[in-house]
């Protein structure tokens, strides 16, 4: 069968004759299946192992005039289906578990099959860790008497576990059986979800201490401070362990999963596959917000009748249902992932086609990673770390990723709070609104980034420039935070009860109209009066009666003495909830927030692709592991803390928990926008600087050198240019 010819000497390859195959091929029953051979001077004698020519035969660059063997006529039809490179040791490439490899499973033994199952796993991880956790954390605090810093430790346990496990998993898993590491990781993640739901079944029934009249003038009730503490707070350690298992299980997913996809598809298709994978991970949190919000509208003790509504501050929803479902789904999805082979059938042809773009070190030490035995023992770990630390492009890409991760972590944590304050929304409305904003911007930006790399077939240098362009675009868009929506007027907080300015900016929730009510500051339940002024609670508005609005189900308070000052006596009313904002700047703010999120996520897949390409092939998994450690240590963990501390500076009204300061109830919108702008500018400028330095310091392999999967051809590795004539039956996207 005649093959395409290539008579050029670009990249050190020259094929003066047609490529043909004359070696007799093994029968289907033989171990290893179909093997390709290299024809040296003594004929078809040397097998290709994983696409690498053995030292017993001349390398392609040494035998340009030597034709490869042609198929015998009886075998030609089978050769039309393409070449399958299999390990010379007879490595099993069938999909299955041990000796159980039914033929029907082989339909999924493709790159698309792997992508599907990994997408489901990343979707479940995102839905659980970044969706359910953020949605139910308030309910867990209320149910188990946890303080904010304790719930913060629960959330941080995920990143702590990831940082602890990343080095070990990425180093040994990168040179081991990746699907097994991935499958066991997803299984551990499922066990973590089930453990997280366990406290619901080991504690007693939740009793909400409430009555319809609580909160009105003269009817306030509050738990004595001596009873605030509870033995239930000890369950925080169970939640922390569950989150720790989440972190352990997800560690292989975003290191080994990415490199497994990258190794088993064509180089120019890799960014698209990775983009689809990460898009599923971004859609997961959106689903977690929506599904978790639905479950929170169900009372935690299913089947028991209760006289309070979900809007009540004492309500605890069914926070645990989502974790049970996600845990069971993770256990199920781990089974097919465990059945995949170490490398997919036919993936070896992508190895010989790949062109190395690894950064070239001046001392040539990057060639150490080309040794097939490098990285398989613990003694190579220090050398692996040293090689990465000597790669300035990799280092600055990690630092740029850390700055972007800081913004993403801060944005995902406090984005709903920003919308809640600026547009006077409830917490559930703000979370839903933010989800609708992030899904098209974040998911679309992630997929579009991978599509652009594939569309324009960008090399490593061009990819870094694309990242730089995206960062500069989001840097310009972030100046939108110069504008803000004005605060809704709130009696005693933004103004006096009579509408005058607060003296010296000091809070004063007590006035003549509510002095006889005995209102307590522990109960924050904002109401909106018919005078379009918000009040701290029905009691602080001087309301004496309560009824229910049959049209929308909200509580309506009557005979509000503070509201009726400007109206007819006895006509003062207030409705539960915040006053609706009519900010005219709302569309502009949302539009530019969309742009910031879009371009921030648009650079994520190109930056990840650049990281994979600027290091040697054998170090890709380990490089991703080290990058994740840097990103989490410098970005993911401190990001929410940095943003939170800056936003807290704009707080007007703090929660009073028996004399101790709790969370913030009301923010000053102008200060919140100003501090958000400062934080965004600092990290975007740093990210832009790091991408510029990475681009300037990147040193690609010289074009005249023979390409190799690990920088050197002397070890028998060789790559073909992506635009060169390809081998038959290449898998299309």
Image: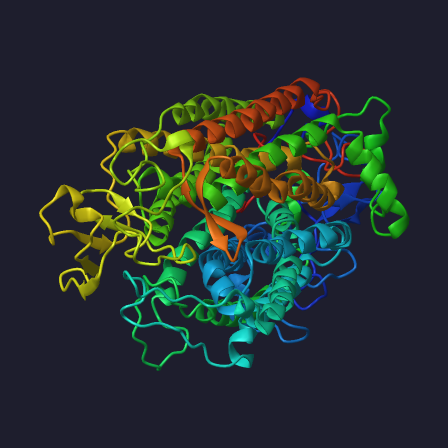
Left or right of residue 259: residue 412:
left
Quadrant of res 386: top right
**What residue do we see at 48% from left, 52% from top?**
656
Whether residue 595 is visible here, answered yes or no, is no
Whether residue 157 is visible here, answered yes or no, is yes
Quadrant of res 464: top right
**What residue do we see at 66% from left, 31% from top?**
399
State the image coordinates of residue 108 (x, y, percent, origin top left).
Answer: 52, 62
In which quadrant of the rendered image does the N terminus lie?
top right
State the image coordinates of residue 627 (x, y, percent, origin top left).
Answer: 68, 40
In the current view of this chain or complex, which residue is farthest to the left? 568
Q: Which is nearer the eye, 107 or 231?
A: 231
Q: Which is nearer the eye, 374 or 301?
A: 301
**What residue do we see at 28% from left, 56% from top?**
538
Left or right of residue 199: residue 518:
left
**What residue do we see at 42% from left, 30% from top?**
504
Left or right of residue 444: residue 369:
right
State the image coordinates of residue 229 (x, y, percent, origin top left).
Answer: 57, 67
In the current view of this chain or complex, which residue is farthest to the top? 696
In the image, residue 690 sits, relative to residue 56, either above or below, namely above
- Exactly how many numbered labels are in the figure? 0
What colour-coding does the image apply?
A: rainbow
State the image coordinates of residue 26 (x, y, percent, origin top left).
Answer: 70, 60
Left or right of residue 210: residue 42:
right
Q: Which is nearer the eye, 573 or 676?
A: 573
């Amino acid at each position: 069968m005649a093959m395409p010819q290539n008579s050029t000497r670009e990249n050190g390859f020259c094929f003066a004759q047609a490529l043909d195959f004359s070696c007799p091929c093994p029968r289907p029953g033989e171990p290893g299946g179909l093997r390709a051979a290299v024809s040296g001077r003594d004929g078809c004698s040397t097998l290709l192992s994983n696409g690498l020519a053995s030292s017993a035969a001349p390398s392609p660059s040494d035998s340009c005039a030597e034709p490869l063997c042609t198929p015998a006529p009886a075998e030609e039809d089978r050769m039309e289906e393409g070449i399958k490179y299999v390990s010379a040791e007879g490595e099993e490439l069938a999909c299955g578990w041990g000796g159980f490899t039914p033929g029907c499973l082989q339909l999924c033994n493709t790159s698309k099959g792997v992508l599907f199952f990994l997408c489901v796993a990343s979707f479940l991880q995102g839905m659980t860790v970044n969706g359910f956790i953020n949605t139910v954390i308030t309910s867990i605090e209320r149910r188990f008497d946890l303080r904010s810093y304790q719930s913060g430790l629960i959330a941080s346990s995920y990143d702590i576990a990831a940082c602890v496990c990343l080095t070990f998993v990425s180093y040994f898993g990168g040179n081991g059986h990746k699907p097994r590491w991935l499958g066991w990781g997803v299984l551990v993640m499922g066990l973590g979800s089930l453990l997280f739901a366990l406290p619901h079944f080991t504690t007693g029934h939740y009793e909400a201490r409430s009555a319809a009249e609580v909160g009105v003038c003269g009817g306030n009730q509050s738990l004595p401070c001596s009873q605030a503490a509870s033995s239930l707070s000890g369950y925080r350690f169970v939640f922390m362990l569950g989150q720790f298992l989440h972190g352990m299980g997800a560690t292989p997913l975003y290191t080994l999963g990415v490199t497994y996809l990258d190794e088993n598809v064509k180089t120019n298709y890799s960014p698209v596959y990775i983009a689809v994978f990460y898009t599923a991970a971004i859609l997961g949190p959106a689903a977690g917000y929506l599904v978790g919000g639905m479950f929170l509208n169900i009372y935690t003790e299913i089947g028991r009748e209760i006289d309070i509504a979900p809007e009540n501050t004492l309500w605890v929803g069914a926070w645990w249902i989502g974790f049970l479902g996600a845990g069971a789904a993770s256990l199920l999805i781990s089974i097919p992932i465990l059945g995949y082979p170490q490398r997919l059938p036919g993936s070896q042809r992508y190895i010989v086609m790949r062109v190395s773009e690894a950064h070239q070190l001046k001392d040539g030490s990057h060639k150490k990673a080309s040794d097939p035995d490098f990285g398989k023992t613990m003694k190579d770990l220090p050398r692996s770390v040293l090689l990465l630390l000597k790669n300035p492009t990799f280092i600055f890409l990690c630092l740029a990723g850390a700055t972007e991760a800081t913004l993403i972590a801060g944005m995902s944590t406090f984005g709903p709070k920003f919308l809640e304050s600026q547009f006077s929304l409830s917490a559930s409305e703000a979370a839903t609104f933010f989800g609708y904003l992030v899904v098209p911007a974040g998911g679309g930006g992630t997929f579009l980034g991978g599509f652009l790399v594939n569309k324009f077939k960008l090399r490593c240098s061009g990819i870094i420039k694309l990242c730089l362009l995206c960062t500069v675009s989001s840097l310009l868009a972030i100046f939108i935070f110069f504008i803000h929506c004005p605060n809704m007027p709130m009696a005693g907080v933004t103004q006096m009860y009579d509408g005058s300015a607060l003296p010296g900016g000091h809070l004063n929730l007590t006035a003549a109209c509510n002095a006889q009510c005995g209102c307590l500051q522990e109960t924050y339940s904002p109401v909106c009066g018919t005078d379009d002024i918000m009040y701290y609670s029905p009691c602080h508005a001087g309301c004496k009666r309560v009824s229910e609005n049959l049209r929308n189900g909200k509580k309506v308070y009557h005979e509000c003495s503070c509201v009726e000052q400007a109206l007819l006596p006895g006509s003062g009313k207030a409705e539960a909830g915040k006053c609706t904002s009519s900010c005219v700047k709302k569309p502009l703010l949302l539009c530019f927030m969309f742009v910031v999120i879009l371009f921030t996520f648009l650079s994520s897949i190109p930056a990840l692709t650049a990281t994979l390409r600027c290091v040697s092939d054998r170090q890709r998994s380990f490089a991703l592991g080290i990058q994740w450690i840097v990103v989490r240590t410098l970005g993911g963990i401190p990001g929410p803390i940095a943003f939170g501390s800056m936003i807290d500076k704009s707080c007007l009204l703090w929660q009073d928990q028996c004399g101790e300061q709790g969370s913030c109830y009301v923010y000053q919108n102008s200060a919140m926008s100003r501090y958000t702008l400062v934080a965004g500018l600092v990290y975007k400028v740093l990210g832009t600087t790091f991408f510029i330095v990475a681009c300037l310091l990147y040193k690609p392999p010289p074009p005249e050198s023979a390409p190799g999967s690990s920088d050197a051809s002397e070890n028998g590795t060789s790559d073909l240019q992506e635009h060169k004539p390809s081998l038959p039956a290449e898998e299309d996207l």
